Image: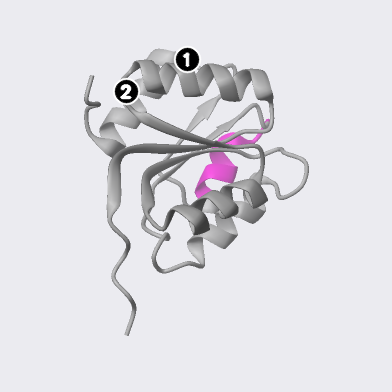
Amino acid sequence: MVDSPPPCSRDTILLVEDDPGIREALCELLTDSGYRAAAAADGQDAIRLLEGDGRAPCLVLLDLMMPGMNGWEFRRWLAGRPELAQVPVVLLSAHANLPAEARALDVAAFLRKPIDVDRMLDTVASLCGPSAA
């Protein structure tokens, strides 16, 4: 029997991004838009946050190209966890073949860097619901 997923905090977005400037700016944007943002510098850092929190976020915004555990490895880890596999993932990347990578990783959406913030917020709202703001 598969355990039921942990309660999903409908306003929490997990951002996995290695660039500190982008990570800070996107977290601030999400927070200013009424979401709770949790930030990780790579896949391993994200795993520590997920295992420590005990609750699934409503969405993961995932960079692909990162040192340490990259986005591909983290996505495979996430998909292999029954309690987290249903969490939508949105790729954030400048990868040349982003549409194909998004299909291969079975993600909900992808956004090309540099990020169009209005499009990102629309994507977040469509997957998590409107913010509390």
Circle 2: residue type: Asp
Residue 95 x/y as whole percent: 67, 32
Residue 7 x/y as whole percent: 28, 56
Identified at 64% across, 36% down, the residue is 97
Identified at 23% across, 34% down, the residue is 129
Question: Which of marks 2 and 1 precedes in the sequence?
Answer: 1
Q: Quadrant of residue 131?
A: top left
Res 23 label: none
Q: Tell me which segment is drawn in magenta.
A: 96-104
Identified at 32% across, 61% down, the residue is 6
Seen from the viewer's position, the closer of residues 124 and 46 is 46
Seen from the viewer's position, the closer of residues 51 and 1 is 51
Is 133 on the left-hand or right-hand side of 121?
left
Compared to residue 50, the image places residue 26 above or below, namely above
Residue 55 x/y as whole percent: 37, 54
> Which residue lies most toward the bottom here?
1
> Which residue lies most toward the right here?
67
Element type where label 2 sits in the image = helix
Residue 45 x/y as whole percent: 63, 47
Is 112 on the left-hand or right-hand side of 107?
right
Is 73 on the left-hand or right-hand side of 106?
right
Compared to residue 116, the image places residue 93 above or below, namely below
Compared to residue 81, the image places residue 126 above or below, namely above
Circle 1: residue type: Asp
Q: Please, what is the dominant secondary structure of the magenta stretch?
A: helix
> Is residue 59 shown to the viewer in this render?
yes
In the picture, which quadrant includes the N terminus? bottom left
Number of residues whose C-alpha sits closer than 10 Å to that of mark 2, classed few (under 14), some (14–19) or many (20 or more):
few
In the picture, which quadrant includes the C terminus? top left
- Residue identified by numbered label 1: 116
- Residue identified by numbered label 2: 122
Q: Quadrant of residue 89?
A: top left
